[in-house]
Amino acid sequence: VNNQKWIIMKIEKGIPINKSFRQTAKETFMSMEVGDSFLVDTVKDRNNCLTVSCMISKDTGYKFSLRSVPGGWRFWRVK
């Protein structure tokens, strides 16, 4: 006796994929001018942004600073 059950899924076309958090963070960092900053309020967002900021610094020479502030963590572009 075969007890396999098959799942039937509807295939959809033309559904756009959302940008990942890292793609959005990269765009944010790349658009910052010296003195600009933004706030993140979760450890996961802080860690993701820290990774992205290090990658951008290596590729572009931009420098960022991270500080713990009331309400979360703030990233500044400093160079």
Image: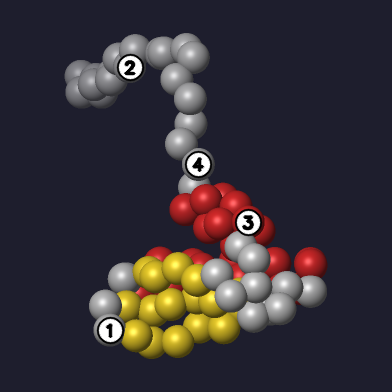
The residue located at (41%, 13%) in the rendering is 12
Give the residue type at disc 2: Met
Give the residue type at disc 4: Lys
Say if 68 sits above or below 24 in the image.
below
Give the residue type at disc 3: Ser
The residue located at (50%, 76%) in the rendering is 75
Query: Along the line of sight, which residue is nearer the eye, 1 or 60?
Result: 60
Mark with earlier residue (4, 2) = 2
Q: Which residue is mark 4?
A: 19
Crowd tier of the residue under label 2, counting other residues whose Cα lies within 10 Å: few below 14, some 14–19, many 20 or above: few
Query: Along the line of sight, which residue is nearer the eye, 23 or 38?
Result: 38
In this rendering, position of residue 26 left or right of residue 66:
right
Q: Which residue is mark 2?
A: 9
Q: Nearer the viewer, mark 1 or mark 4?
A: 1
Mark with earlier residue (3, 4) = 4
Distance of label 3 from label 1 (alpha carbons): 24 Å
Quadrant location of the C terminus in the rendered image: bottom right
Distance of label 4 from label 2 (alpha carbons): 24 Å
Mark with earlier residue (1, 4) = 4
Q: Which residue is mark 3?
A: 31
